[in-house]
Amino acid sequence: MKEYSDKNEKENKFGVTCDSTLEFVLQAVNDPKFAASDDFHSWLAKSDDHKALYDECTFFREAALNENKPVFPDIESEWLKFSAEIDPPKSNRKYNLTRWPWIAAAIVISFVLIFPWILQKQKEEKLAAMFEKEVVLQTEDGEIVPVETVDKQKAESMGLKKERKGRYDVLNYKSKVAPSNNPKNYTYMLNIPKGKAYQLVLEDGTEVWINTGTKITFPRRFRADQRVVELDGEAYFKVTKDSKRPFIVKTHNLSTLVMGTEFNVRAYEKEEASVTLVTGKVAVTGEKADQTAVLSPGQNATVGSSGLVIREVDTENYTAWKDGYFYFDEASLEDIMKEASRWYNIEITFSSPRLKNLRFKFWADRSQTFQDAVSMLNQIGKVSIKMTSPNKAVVYPATKN
């Protein structure tokens, strides 16, 4: 095996040039293949100093990667600990004077290596918290704009206008500028957190009511040949007619094509996706090419394990949320509680699985508190829904008097 020192620059068998013992150790910390090599293990066995330095470097790296919260090395305490060893019994003086500069340097370099990761993690956590609570507009280059607090000048620079229409705040992108196929056309993603709903007016005048817990991606200006948006969640569309530019809504497992009509698309993650037509006509396509159907008003298309299923429905069940209401007609309590959980951002559990299958005809105003909304269910006498903490509730069987 080749010898490595702090003074001489040498190249190891992996083609890595090391100008110091510390650099050699850090190479092993960041390269598992190198750390597992016979050469490196032989080098470790030659000196306790080698092993101590390697252990210090790996400790701080692994601590930062394994903990949920950022780990900052306590450089001051480590310095004092090793500085105390500078003046030991004479027999050990040479060993300690050789060892502690490596350790101190390792601590500092480990911190330098970890610090960018810490900053990135803190940034991601901050953004996640913002997306959970605020209506946020994200540009394709990563800029994050809190919609409800953005100043007028910033809003205008992004081509949007904030309005209030009935019960909804509105982002209005309607434009008189002619369509363009410019590939540099900006794309935005609008995030609506739990407990809120919003309205969006696209540049062609199409109105979109966006339900809670939804993300919609759209261009600042549509292309000259088509209009495409992407949806993760639920939205009601009132599409402006344009025979030359079909309007397409894409979700994770279905696509809806229209020319001008009103319909609801529901496509939350890990749930069956569906399209409900109110007026006009739409063509719905599932994940497979043969899963295609043209809907008439009053029909619903759902993509599930059995493919694309078409059925006649009461559209009010699928669109009442747009007008600010919960409306269920003989729906399972599990489905009702799922909607309430999403809107009020409350975790709801069932004390017994059988309660999930109870069916109710239920109506409530979404502006009510959770307790007021479920009190109507409690009055029916089949269940008792109780808050157990500010953000948790449990469904119990109703107690008999």
Image: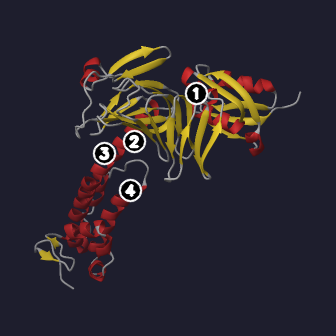
Determine the secondary structure under disc 4.
helix
Q: Nearer the viewer, residue 199 or 239?
A: 239
Labels 2, 4: front one: 2
Real-space Cα distance between discs 3 and 2? Answer: 10 Å
Q: Which mark is residue 65?
A: 4
Q: Nearer the viewer, residue 108 or 212?
A: 212
Instruction: Give the residue at mark 2.
Output: 125
Instruction: Give the residue at mark 1.
Output: 319
Check contact, mark 1 vs mark 2: CB within 8 A.
no
What x and y, as percent, mark residue 191?
42, 33
The answer to whether residue 395 is above or below residue 115 is above
Task: Judge whether residue 123 can be spotted in this image.
Answer: yes
Check contact, mark 1 vs mark 4: CB within 8 A.
no
Determine the secondary structure under disc 2.
helix
Residue type beneath disc 3: Leu
The crowding category of the residue bearing disc 3, from other C-alpha atoms within 10 Å (few below 14, some 14 to 19, many at least 20), is few
Instruction: Give the residue at mark 3.
Output: 119
The crowding category of the residue bearing disc 4, from other C-alpha atoms within 10 Å (few below 14, some 14 to 19, many at least 20), is some
Residue farthest left in this picture: 8
